[in-house]
Image (spheres, grey):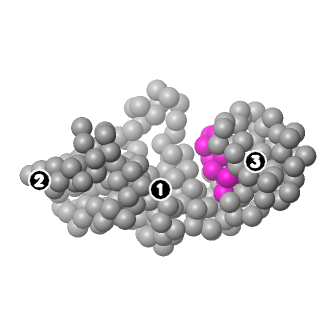
Amino acid sequence: MYMKFGDLCSAEFLFESMDVKDLVAWNAFIAVCVQSGNYALALKYYHKMCANADAVQFDSFTVVSMLSTCGQLGSLEIGKEIYDCARKQEIDCNVIVKNARKQEIDCNVIVKNARLDMYLKCGSTEAGRVLFYEMKQRNVVSWSTMIVGYAMNGYSREALELFTMMKQEGLRPNYVTFLGVLSACSHAGLVNEGKRCQ
């Protein structure tokens, strides 16, 4: 309940007072830290969770939360370590596959989108570009993340080219996509191109 209402101090107190912390409890608390913007606290509890590895192993939910955290903190190296550790432990997506299939979401796309977001927020545009083009499956989040990342990192023309490619592939842009395109146009002084975006 405290987590739902953003009372992070009370949520942390309750979490710490739990005798047994299962994976759901760890993931819920870390996710609340991320959602409330307290990325340093999320990282602290991720490390505590890893120190308690005999009792609990992290999963794809943990990986997505932590890649988001690393992106927000600009901690590319820590993000790479987390992703590499997940790959070594062969973290799979079985926990979320049932729900993802109902929504026709490939959980590998979710993890890759989080990784893509982290690269771009950390300014590693080339690593993001390579990952994007290596992705066998991309959704609107993948495309929007790349477009916004290009715009944030000063690659306005590339953002607009990607937007055109996205539309050619038949994907429908969302508001995040349009924010990225307008940001790219604004940064490059491309007012007319911005007006034509639909």
> Mark 1 against mark 3, which lies toward the viewer?
3
Amino acid type, residue under disc 1 in the picture: Ser
The Cα–Cα distance between marks 1 and 3, rounded to whole angstroms, is 22 Å
Write down the region rendered in magenta.
Answer: 139-149
Look at mark 3 in the image and give the residue it sits on.
Answer: 181
Tell me which numbered mark, 3 or 2, is placed earlier along the sequence: 2
Q: Secondary structure at mark 2?
A: helix
The Cα–Cα distance between marks 3 and 2, rounded to whole angstroms, is 47 Å
Could you classify mark 1 by the number of other residues whose Cα lies within 10 Å: few (under 14), some (14-19), or many (20 or more)? many
Give percent across and percent down for residue 67.
46, 58
Tell me which numbered mark, 2 or 1, is placed earlier along the sequence: 2
Name the mark on residue 68: 1
The Cα–Cα distance between marks 2 and 1, rounded to whole angstroms, is 27 Å
Look at mark 2 in the image and give the residue it sits on.
Answer: 17
Give percent across and percent down for residue 164.
82, 43
Point 53% across, 57% down: residue: 115
Amino acid type, residue under disc 2 in the picture: Ser
Give percent across and percent down for residue 110.
51, 46
Amino acid type, residue under disc 3 in the picture: Val
The quadrant of the image that shows the C terminus is top right
